[in-house]
Image (spheres, grey):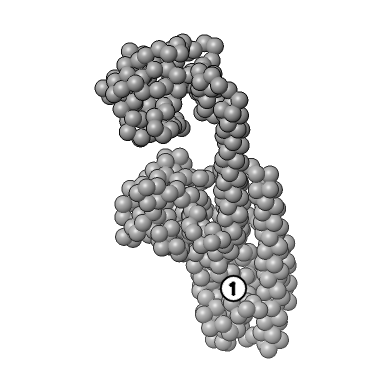
Amino acid sequence: MEASSTIRPQPSGNPLDVHAEAALDRLTRWAARALRAPVSFIALTGADGRLVAQGSSAADAAAVALCGQVVDTRAPDWSDDDDPDAFVAAPLVDSTGAVLGCLCVTDVGPRRWSERDTELVKELAISATTELELRTARRMAEREKRWSDGQQAVLELIAARAPLAKTLTVLLRVSESHAPGMLASILLVERTRGGAVLRHAAAPSLPRSFTSKVDGLQVGEGQGICGTATHRREPVVVLDVEADELTAPFVELARAHGLHAGWSTPILSSDGSALGTFALYYGAERPPKPSDEIVIDRSIHLARLAIEQSNDARALRRSAAHARALAREQTALQRVATSVAAETNPAILFARVAQQVSGLLRAECGYVMRFLDEDRYRVAGSWGRREATMMGIGEIGIQAPDGLGHELRRGRRAMRRSVPADGRPFEYCQKRQSYTLINFFFTDFPAFHRIN
């Protein structure tokens, strides 16, 4: 009697599974020959806990059903002499006590199985379980290596101070490669006067039509999974977008993009403040698995490092710019103080003041003016670039009713970002038809005006 074929594990796309499938094929062929049976197969439990039999036409539905009984009882079983279908089967139980599947040998017609037959099937089941555990170990080792390589790439980008969007995009690609079917995104918290909103940072696998809709999402209860998770500062899981109250405003958006489930975890800084959110979306109902939680934890750790490094670098640049501005101001004040001590001509002194302050503000020209009365002022000093058309020293101007001078006379700061060509709130300097107004007045106390 010639031994028949086997039922192989589900193909997972991992090349390491080839070794396990070859080993299980050898085991089932050897079991069929040793027991002189036409069929020997292995059926494995699928993701939903049901037995999955693929790759063989030798085992029928009845044989797979017998394996289901063995898996449920977690104990070996075999047919009696008068059973029309002869079989002997043993469960595949790993070192953690989980049932991975069943090894089954079947024959045509009634058959008495000897004690040697049943013990042999038990031993072969143990060997098959060992091979499956080795397969799992190889897959985990390969996954860890891929994660280590991906993590190294992200850390190198962080160390090189790469743009944050690029770093987070690479991170999400690494995360998605460890959880097939997952679509990941990162939103960053932006503080506003009205509270806080979430801004799109990275989502390499989500369409722009989706990310543009969630960009600017308010942080608060009921604002989808991301806005709610950031508000609560804890993970939010939604298994059915259409049935959950949190995602009621986003049902049409999720439906348009084929998204059914999702969960979001806030990214918290080292001091506990919310930096953003790490969100995962799936096209089918799918609760988080332990492997997903590992991916989320590792991804959030790297995201936090990247975001805080970017924020620190931005703060450092602002601090350096502020320090340079202070240095320029100190230098300008020192030059003015030196001029005050050495210069007796007021026109030259005021011109130097106008020059120094205009340089600090990167202005085209500047004036020092003295109020004569409520409506008139006189130019006491001025400075302008070569192309500028300037008012002359001693020239008297008339203030417009809505001009800046009325505010300045009351000791208030006044600002006008542009001066229309036909308007004269004060005389202005002209260069290439671009107008900017910066005036400096001295009354009983100095009133300085600065345009940002």
Q: Position of residue 379 (x, y in %)?
A: 42, 17
Q: Position of residue 273 (x, y in %)?
A: 49, 59
Locate residue 85 relative to residue 22 in the image: left or right.
Answer: left
Locate residue 158 relative to residue 439 in the image: left or right.
Answer: right
Q: Is residue 140 above or below residue 166?
A: below
Image quadrant where residue 374 sits = top left
In the displayed orientation, state which residue is furthest to the bottom.
115
| Residue at image point 71% right, 81% down | 123
Q: Position of residue 126 (x, y in %)?
A: 69, 78
Q: Is residue 127 in sight in this rendering?
A: yes
Looking at this view, is 143 or 383 the one in front?
A: 383
In the displayed orientation, state which residue is furthest to the left.
401
Q: Which residue is mark 1?
A: 101
| Residue at image point 35% right, 49% down | 194
Locate residue 443 relative to residue 50 in the image: left or right.
Answer: left
Locate residue 239 relative to residue 345 in the image: left or right.
Answer: left
Image quadrant where residue 141 sits = bottom right
| Residue at image point 63% right, 70% down | 41
Position of the N terminus by quadrant: bottom right
Total labels drawn: 1
Looking at this view, is 251 or 28 the one in front?
A: 251
Residue type, numbered disc 1: Gly
Q: Is residue 82 above or below residue 140?
A: below
Q: Secondary structure at mark 1?
A: strand
| Residue at image point 54% right, 58% down | 269
Looking at this view, is 43 or 4 the one in front?
A: 43
Q: Position of residue 68 (x, y in %)?
A: 52, 75
In the displayed orientation, state which residue is furthest to the front.
344
